Image (tube, rainbow, N blue to C red):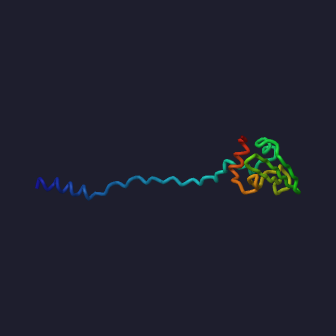
Amino acid sequence: MRRLVPALALFLAACATRPAPPVVEQPKPVAAAPAKPRNTIVGLSAPELVGHFGNPALQVREGVGLKLQFRSSRCVLDAYLYPPESGSGVPRVTYVDTRLPSGAAADQAACISALENPS
């Protein structure tokens, strides 16, 4: 009987429920803001472009828009600036076209880099 009591106590202890572990809330994923590409000039004004690349090789007025062309030995970049839809405000780059001097398409980031670092 002496052995039965400790064995019964161990048996009952094994059947007992353990306290539930505390519930840990998983952090909610944070939506990352879309990353702006490093080599983009969309949104810049004409003075900002000139400050960035120097004087344009060509400047053409097209209605309310303005086209500024920057050239290097490696590529040609055309930046098209238009005022906000409200019609008033500073014109900003809304579209960029890049090409090789031969006229073939060029990678925009590589062209911007070539204009930023002329050799």
Judge from the rendering whether residue 38 lies leftward or rightward of residue 88; answer left or right.
left
User: At which x and y percent is residue 8?
Assistant: 18, 57
Q: Position of residue 86 (x, y in %)?
A: 83, 56
- Which of the image's four quarters has the C terminus? top right
Q: Decide if residue 107 is on the left or right side of residue 20.
A: right
Q: Quadrant of residue 5?
A: bottom left
| Residue 11 appears left or right of 112 | left
**Residue at point 43%, 54% (across, down):** 23
Q: Is residue 51 above or below residue 110?
A: above
Give me the residue at 81% from left, 50% from top: 69
Residue at the (82%, 50%) spot, across then down: 68
Of residues 25 and 56, which is closer to you in this image?
Answer: 56
Please tell me in which quadrant of the rendered image residue 16 appears: bottom left
The extreme left residue here reads 1
Report the residue that reaches farthest toward the bottom.
15
Pinpoint residue 108: horizontal percent, then vertical percent: 70, 52
Q: Which residue occupies 78% across, 45% down?
A: 49
Which of the 4 image quarters holds residue 52? top right
